[in-house]
Amino acid sequence: MRHAQTISVVITTYNRPDALEAVVRACFMQNDKNFEIIIADDGSTANTRACVERLAAASPVLLRHVWQPDVGFRAAMARNRGILAATGDYIIFLDGDCIPQRDFIARHRALARPGCLVSGSRILMSETLTRRVLDDGIDVAATSPLTRLRWRLRGDLNKTLQPLGLRWPDLGRTSRKFSWRRIKSCNLAVWRGDLERVNGFDESFTGWGHEDSDLVVRLFHAGVMRKDGAFATEVFHLWHREAQRDQETSNRKVVLERAANKVTQATIGLREHENTAAWRAHGRRPLNK
């Protein structure tokens, strides 16, 4: 049975260096260090660049920074650029405000199976706790179950069992039908070959919403099964104000149409980057059309 070898963690960020630092430093503390980090930056300013330079100097694993100009919400393009910069055969997508637990990489590696993706889950943190964590430098992943239980009882966490470290075995996780439930690219693992097969994230999506659902539904129609990473790969999601959702309805409509028509290919995706400098710099082979 094939397991992931080198893993690439693609962390998406935009102008939130304090959260990014907490996330990346938690990555440094993983009990499985056979991975690399790609910071996929959707146009952040110099503060984030300085933060990444500090982190890179202290990183125990390879860390790269991929930046693109800020011309609006373009998470799909940022993630595609992160894929292009990655060298791993298994890609874990993580948002720059989602703090992984110590066994995050190990658990994703254990769940990885050919022909499957893993949709991870998250534990939402309150605004008050988020501020304390960032201002006081609290290492969330190192806190005790008792501390987390207190946070839960105060309403600072939205879940009870997962923060306490409860883990389920890799049984009954694979879904044989597509579901919208818990599709979050803030915690999503996909084989690189499967991403290439469907042309990656679709950059034709504009504004916030459903570019991650679109990827998963296209992968499903390409024969990739979905595994639920709950009670295995939870991350602590730092509070933030909700993004503008002007395009959510139209984006959802596109995904529903593609689901009905069994579409597999992104309109604008990885293949459209084949002639870019980033592609050539990493010696990428041409993708199958």
Image (tube, grey):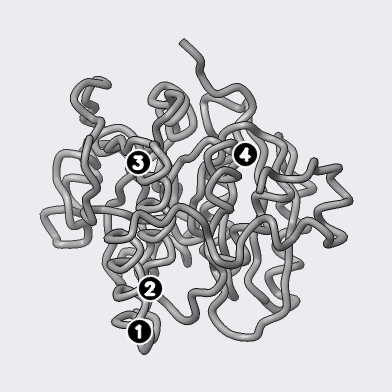
Judge by depth and name the residue closer to the eye, 174 or 142.
174
N-terminal-most mark, 2 or 1: 2
Instruction: Point out which mark residue 143 bears.
Output: 3
Residue pointed to by mark 4: 8
Q: In front: mark 1 or mark 3? A: 1
Q: Residue type at mark 1: give it.
A: Arg
Can you name the residue that lies furthest to the bottom here? 246
Mark 2–mark 1 Cα distance, whole angstroms, equals: 7 Å
Residue 53 found in image quarter? bottom right
Left/right of residue 229 with respect to residue 265 in the rendered view: left
N-terminal-most mark, 3 or 2: 3
Disc 3 element = loop
N-terminal-most mark, 4 or 2: 4
**Residue 208 placed where, x, y %?**
42, 77
Mark 3–mark 4 Cα distance, whole angstroms, equals: 26 Å
Mark 1–mark 4 Cα distance, whole angstroms, equals: 29 Å
